[in-house]
Amino acid sequence: MKQEGWTRTLALTVCSAAIGGTFQYGYNISIINAPTTYVQKFINETCMKRWGTALDSSQVTLIWTFIVSIYSLGGLMGSLLAGPMAIKCGRKGALLLNNCFLFLSAVLALSSRYAGSFEMIILARLLVGVNAGVSMNVQPMYFGESAPKNLRGAVAFSSAVFTALGILMGQITGLTEVLGSESLWPYLLASNALPGLVQLVTLPWFPESPRYLLIDRGDREACGQALKRLRASSVFTAEMDEILQEREEAGEARAKTLWELFSDRSLRRQLCTVMAASSAMMLCGNDSIYFYASYIFQEAGIPTDKIQYVTIGTGACEFTSAMVCNLLIERVGRRLLLAGGYLFMSFWAVVFTIALSLEGKVAGMPYLSMVCVFAYILSFGMGPAGVTGILPAELFDQMARPAAYMIAGSMMWLSLFFIGMAFPFIVSGLGQFCFIPFCGVCVTACIFITFTLPETKGRTLAEITEEFEKRNKKGTANGLPKYGQPSGSLTDPSECLETENV
């Protein structure tokens, strides 16, 4: 039916929200790789001017690693802000307000060299991380609540498509011939303001989330107008009835706090699934490839002058796989894409390790290593990159969704910070075995998702919840509370093991 398919308004809403949302996340991950040498030189020169003493290479590397990784701490802060912002300002309003962090970070990045302060770069990266943290949580929420049920996965997965597009565009912008030169690196770090400006100009013209308007604000008329524009039809009775039913079930309840969500036994299994998937998405090491692409390709034996061009291939791989997966997600389903993606990543991590071990002994190994990195990223883009962000929208109701995204985002950004700080030391310490820890993460994630996550494709929240209840029968048989029963405080430490009874 027409009202259940893509419409012009829905497509433009997705583009407008994403260009200043997850596009920024990918863009700011990749642009920081290009000016590595120039910023490190700037750090050393700044210290020489201040104290008359140059830093040794390990000290410069430590400061540079902190500049890179503080982006993740900003993302964590943004994740914690995302829930309250989405509740108070609405999904669209939160995305628009979020650009304030972005524009301030651009000003700091532009001014840093003239002010002779690398600390301004640190603060700029922190603020742009806050921007990414908010958008990574609010945007999938906005998409999941605005899309028709049969397109919910494809619309939500477009977040991953724009993330990959942001990575690719950041790599292109970071080329020496564009903004990646020593004289232009402050402009490179500030170039993220342009996509934010595009969103600020375009997004106000598109509708707010219909579910937010009706369930949170109780505005049935505004919800109807939003649905009319998004579906390009005046006939949406069934969808309106579904939203009304969810509102009636919520009653006068307000949005759950983090502690209330943690304490709710009926949602414990869903919460553990989302937390594990969000952590694995970063602990698998894929995004660290963009942070430290130079380290990886140097280890693989790629000539230094060719690395910036090879790096563009990694972004192109993820963008291509995200586009393909966006077409497959409503046919194949979520669980298969997630588990299959991690399974293929495990395989390519093993092949990459073998290739690095045979480097110098067998001809062509550096190029096999490069192929393995591309295949690893392709596998990531085919599932974990996009499906992970959909899960909170599909596993939690309107009252629990903001808190669920806050928790999922926090796990994601904490994991990214840990990997961002540890990755250079993993590469230098383990050498050719640097991808073995990531292989272990991928294998564990594949097994966990296979046995804990039910398929959510085309299902309503009630149907998904019922499936979780079926999976919890084993826990119920052991005397643990059944999902759907009223929540209560945990008085027995053994109750904490409830979620492990798969």
Image: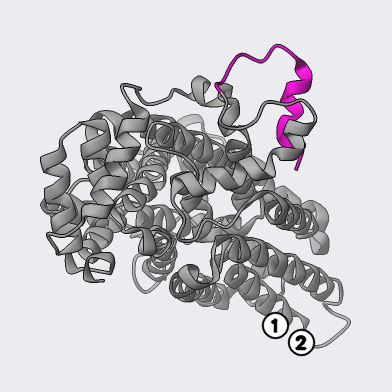
Gap between marks 1 and 2 measured at Cα: 6 Å
The residue at the point 56 percent across, 33 percent down is 267
Residue 21 shows in this picture: yes
Q: Residues within 10 Å of mark 2 (few under 14, many from 20)?
A: few
Q: Which mark is residue 71?
A: none
The residue at the point 27 percent across, 52 percent down is 239
Disc 1 designates what residue?
367
The percent position of residue 54, horizontal first and vertical second, equals: 57, 40
The percent position of residue 261, horizontal first and vertical second, equals: 51, 26
Image vertical order of residue 159 relative to residue 353, above or below = above
Looking at the rendering, the stretch of residues picked out in magenta corresponds to 486-502
The percent position of residue 460, horizontal first and vertical second, equals: 44, 51
As drawn, which residue projects farthest toward the top?
491
The residue at the point 80 percent across, 51 percent down is 429
Disc 2 designates what residue?
364
- Which residue is more in the foreground, 223 or 308? 223
As drawn, which residue projects farthest toward the right?
361
Q: Quadrant of the N terminus?
A: bottom left
Image vertical order of residue 120 relative to residue 162, above or below = above
The residue at the point 59 percent across, 16 percent down is 488
Q: Residues within 10 Å of mark 1 (few under 14, many from 20)?
A: some
Q: Amino acid at mark 2?
A: Gly
Q: Is residue 495 magenta?
A: yes
Image vertical order of residue 444 relative to residue 275, above or below = below
Q: Amino acid at mark 1?
A: Tyr
Q: What kind of element bears circle 1?
A: helix
Q: What kind of element bears circle 2?
A: loop
**Which image quadrant is residue 27 in?**
bottom left
Q: Is residue 487 magenta?
A: yes
Q: Are marks 1 and 2 in contact (CB under 8 Å)?
A: yes
As drawn, which residue projects farthest toward the bottom?
363
